[in-house]
Every structure is written in C-alpha cells, then in structure tokens.
Image (cartoon, grey):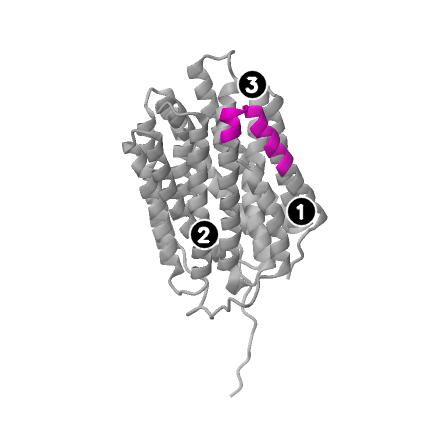
Amino acid sequence: MSEHLTAPPPLRWLNRNVLGIGFADLAADANYEMVFAVLPLFITVGLGAPALAVGLVEGVGDGSSAVVKLWSGWYSDRVAWRRRLAVGGYGTTVFGLALLVAVTSWPQVIVARALAWMGRGLRQPIRSAMLAASVERKDLGKAFGFHEALDTAGALIGPGVAFLLLSTGHDFRSVFWIALVPGVLCVVLFALITRDPRQGRPEPVSLRVPLPAGFWRLMAPVAIFGVGNFATAFFTLRAAQIMQPELGRTAALSAAVGFYLAHNAVGATVSFPAGWLADHVGKAPVLAAAYLTFAAACLVGLFGHGWAALGLMALLVGAQNPVVSSVEGSLTSSLVEERRLGTAFGFLNGINGAADLASSVVAGALWTFVSPQSALGLGALLCAAAALLLWLRQPKNV
C-alpha cells in the first residue's frame, strides 16, 4: 500500500503561541512599566539620589541582563525544557521588582533592579526564539509587530495605573504593590498557554559552526545604536525639566509620568503597522528609520521646551522603541536558521544589554557632571551613525 505524502498545512501567523506570548508579555510589561514609570522619580525625589544613580541602576540592570541573555540563548538551543526556564525568568523578574517595596536607599534599588533584569535576560531569548519558530518567515514582521503591540499595550496600562495612583495621593510604594498583580498574571499566562514549537529533543548544535555573516553585519549598527540609546528614564527626567518653571514641581512630575504614558500609547499604535511594513518594504530600512527617530527625539529634548516639545518628544520616543525591538527580532529571525535562534537572540540581546549598560552609565555621568544637553547630544550622534551604517551595509537573508 502506498502512502500519499502531502505538504503540511501552512502555519497561521496568528496562532496559539503568538497570542500566548503576546498576552503574557502584555501583563509582564504592565508589571515592570508600572514600576519604571515612577522609578527614576522614586530614586531622585523619594530617595534623594542624583541623576547618576538613575544611570547606575539602569546600567547595572542592563549589564546583568546581558550576561544572562548570552548564556540563556546558547543553553536553550541545547535543552528540551527551555519553556520552563522561561517561566522561571518571568517569575524572577516579578520577585526582583517586588523587593522595591522594602528598599530604603538607592544602592538597594540596584540589587532589586539587577535581579529583575536577570530574570528578563533568562526568558527573553527563549521567548523570541519560540515566537520566531511559531510562524513562517514571510510573516515574521507581522508576528513580531503584533507581539510588540501587545507588549507596548501593557507598557501603556502600567504607567496609566501609576499615573492614576500618584494623582490620587498614593505614594511610590503603593505603585510597587499594585504592580504585583499583572506580574503574577504574566507567569500564569506563559506557563498555561504557550507550547515549545520544537518537536522532541533539539538537535546538537556545534560551537564550531559560526552564525551567518549577515547576522554579524547587523550586530555592528545594533551595538552603536545601543550605546547611544540610553534608558527612557532619562527622557522622563527631561520631561519634568522642560515643563518648569511654567508648572510647579508637583505638576511637572505628573506631566513627566504623563509623558511616559503617552510615549507607550504611541508605541502600541505603531508596532503592528511597522511590522507589516517591514515584511513588505524590507526590515533593514524600517529599522534604520527607527534609529533615526531616536536621534530626532534626542534633538527635541536638547532644544525643546513646554507642552509642544513634550508632545513631540513622546511621539518620537514612542514611535521608535517598539519598532526597534520588533524589527531587530524579526530581522535576526530571517538571518539565522531555526535551530540556532536561541543562540542568535542571546547574542542580540546580550549586545543590546552591554550597550545599554554603557549608555546608561555614560548618560548618567554626563547628565550629572556636565549637563542633560551633553547626554542628549551624544545619543543623537551615535544613533544617527548607527542608522547610516545599517542603511549602507544592509544584512542579507539566508
């Protein structure tokens, strides 16, 4: 009896894994963005620390995350239980941020932030590899864009709740307590809904087989952009500065949290259209445009003042952040074979994390010892250089 072999049905890009990972990260972002919307203000106003402390907190968190991402990506390609490892990462992030309710000095914030971001580093390469393997290559932009839209929607919900809490007289620690609710939810959603798209045990991957040249060509502009792309926390600080003296100190702080809320609203709006556009016109040009958008945001922060500058800065910061994240992910997925995606995402996220460490520490030092304008100017220069390099040396798909 002969068997008729038929081709497997095409994968739907909007499937269980895309939805499960997306909604888990919506809750995860609501958790940590609720905290991060007020964290720079908690450090500088609540604990009386200088802006340098904000840079150190952000930098150490990103640096610790970078180390874990490199190991997690490499290791996850070699084990069959990577999904459980990712669940542990989600839980570690929630636990680390929960420690903030008990801190009494800014060095303690470094410990809590580093632990939280080590958890993020543990799960991020695994999550990205699972997402990439759940769809066909022609749909990578849409899948990553849809994920980033849900991710950014969580980043809109979190600061929105923080803004309501602060505006109704609650303190920073009340925000940290409420953030635990979506934190627990994200762990439950990822654990119950997602499935590892790999079948059986993963094939052994030789360390002697290099990642493709196109991937390493992408890493050069990624690293340059990362060094210039300082944490959004500094834009939050700048938002409060450019609204004074027209607004009093309390009103300016509320406006800064409002900026954080508005920039995430923009991100949630543009994420999916940007992913669709990347699938149709090319991922590298869309990514280069996003790099330039961050440079433009720095220039607005450098020269702007008042409500118009605040709105434009929110528009530009919000437009670039989720696009950079989703298109870097979809472009990496198109350059690397599926069985090595964990390793590739480990390198991508590790390079980003190490560059973020450098950018946050340098920005914090310049902000404190020179001027906010010097930090913003350096960010604009480096991000424009990264966009130019990516445009001139676009990586080719495998």
Label 1: element kind: helix
Label 2: element kind: helix
The range drawn in magenta is 365-382
The amino acid type of the residue labelled 2 equals Lys
Front one among 171 and 217 = 217
Is residue 201 positioned above or below 316 on the image? below
The amino acid type of the residue labelled 3 equals Trp
Label 3: element kind: helix
The amino acid type of the residue labelled 1 equals Leu
Q: Left or right of 50: which side holds 230?
A: right
Q: Left or right of 124: which side holds 289?
A: right
Majority secondary structure in the magenta region: helix
Q: Which residue is mark 2?
A: 69
Judge the density around disc 2: few (<14), some (14-19), many (≥20) Cα neighbours within 10 Å. many
Considering every residue shown, the one lying at the far right of the view is 392
Q: Residue at x 52, y 59 (%)?
A: 341
* Residue at mark 3 to residue at mark 1: CA–CA distance: 33 Å
Q: Which residue is mark 3?
A: 307
Where does the image place residue 211, in percent across and percent down from the top left? 57, 61
Where does the image place residue 106, in percent across and percent down from the top left? 35, 30
**Sequence-earlier tag: 3 or 1:** 3
Considering every residue shown, the one lying at the far front of the view is 369
* Residue at mark 2 to residue at mark 1: CA–CA distance: 24 Å
Where does the image place residue 242, in percent across and percent down from the top left? 54, 19
Is residue 167 positioned above or below 70 on the image? above
Q: Which residue is mark 1?
A: 390
Q: Residue at x 39, y 47 (%)?
A: 118
* Residue at mark 3 to residue at mark 2: CA–CA distance: 39 Å
